[in-house]
Image: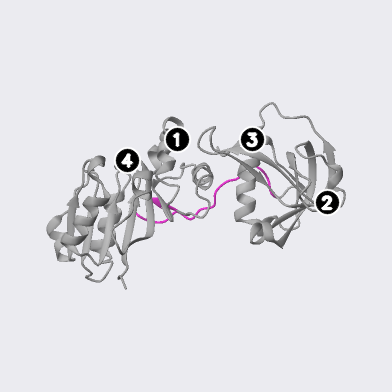
Amino acid sequence: MIEEIPVYLFTGFMDSGKTSLICQTLLAEQFGDGAKTLLIACEDGEEEYDEDALKKVNTRLLMIEEEEDFTEALLKNIHSQYLPDQVFLEYNGTWGMDTLLEMQLPEGWVIVQSLATVDAATFDMYLTNMRAMILEQLFKADVIIFNRCTDTTPKGKFRRAVKAVNRPAQIVYERADGTIDETEEDLPFDINQDVIEISDADYAIWYMDAQENYKKYDGKKVEFTGLVYNPDKLKKGVMVPGRFAMTCCIEDVTFLGFKCKYPDSKQIPHKSWIHIIAKIQVEFAMEYKGKGPVLYPVLIEPAEKPEDELVYFS
């Protein structure tokens, strides 16, 4: 039986804090308790590794500077030469993630955790100018750390951008002094209204929040304009009003809708537009594979198709 060799993957753009996080993990926290560690660094950032300090924690540093050199054959040779107990892989933020994810790693190597670091000071700029490229570094990460946060960091906007492509990710906001920022994110609508009015601009934001924090919406009423998913194959009394949302680019469009229980559902044509006011009840639903918000309409009216049928996460 081949012994499993855990691989810890660190992604993110250059100068986003990957090296600092790895040094903190290996040196300050002495992760692995002296296990024979191979650290593969695929870029040379501003912060350099102290090889003498790494040797004291039984860690060997290996640089791979060119993407074309990062091959299955090279990694297998590295494995045979070093026979590590664990591997830390600092991936280059400008390399395509498919280069790594489609690769057959050496026998026994298993990516057990993927962490991504993001400089909160520059993330907004990257979202505007290099959205697909920056989000590619984040879409498989288990934990995403936004560092260098301040009081003005738009945490809600950043969270929505990430969750649009990586819903399960755990997101951490870290200030420049290393402390964790746990202040709540502001929402662009008032959940304390008798009826929560959700505009087209806020639909994707509300959808994400209601999916993740459904308990706070239990018993509340919500109002929005939606496209109805109601094909013949859907059972009577159930339909799904929602909106199509764009995540990274126009090629990445997905439907965001909630299960809706309505006795006269078959009277609502498939792909018709409606204005709906509904009470939210938290229930177990097979569609959610657990508990989630289920809509019970109190008012349904035909609606005009919006000028822009898509909704967005920013």
Q: Nearer the viewer, mark 2 or mark 1?
A: 2
Name the spot of residue 194 as percent of width and height, x first.
78, 48
SS label for mark 3: helix
Name the spot of residue 181 as percent of width and height, x first.
45, 53
The answer for how far apart the CA atoms under marks 2 and 3 are is: 26 Å
Q: Amino acid at mark 3?
A: Ala
Q: Amino acid at mark 1?
A: Arg
SS label for mark 1: helix
Name the spot of residue 89 as percent of width and height, x first.
28, 54
Q: Amino acid at mark 2?
A: Tyr
| Residue at image coords 29%, 42% | 15
Q: Residue 131 shows which numbered tag?
A: 1
**Looking at the rendering, which quadrant does residue 197 occupy?**
top right
Residue 29 higher or lower than 239, as above or below = below
Tell me the residue that label 4 is attached to. Answer: 95
Name the spot of residue 276 as percent of width and height, x first.
79, 42
| 91 sits to left or right of 220 | left
Q: Nearer the viewer, mark 3 or mark 1?
A: 1
| 50 sits to left or right of 272 | left
| 184 sits to left or right of 263 | left
Which mark is first along the chain, 3 or 2? 3
The answer for how far apart the CA atoms under marks 2 and 1 are is: 39 Å
Which mark is first along the chain, 4 or 1? 4
Residue 34 higher or lower than 311, as above or below = below
Q: Nearer the viewer, mark 4 or mark 3?
A: 4
Tell me the residue that label 2 is attached to. Answer: 262
The answer for how far apart the CA atoms under marks 4 and 2 are is: 49 Å
Tell me the residue that label 3 is attached to. Answer: 201
178 magenta-colored: yes
Q: Amino acid at mark 4?
A: Trp
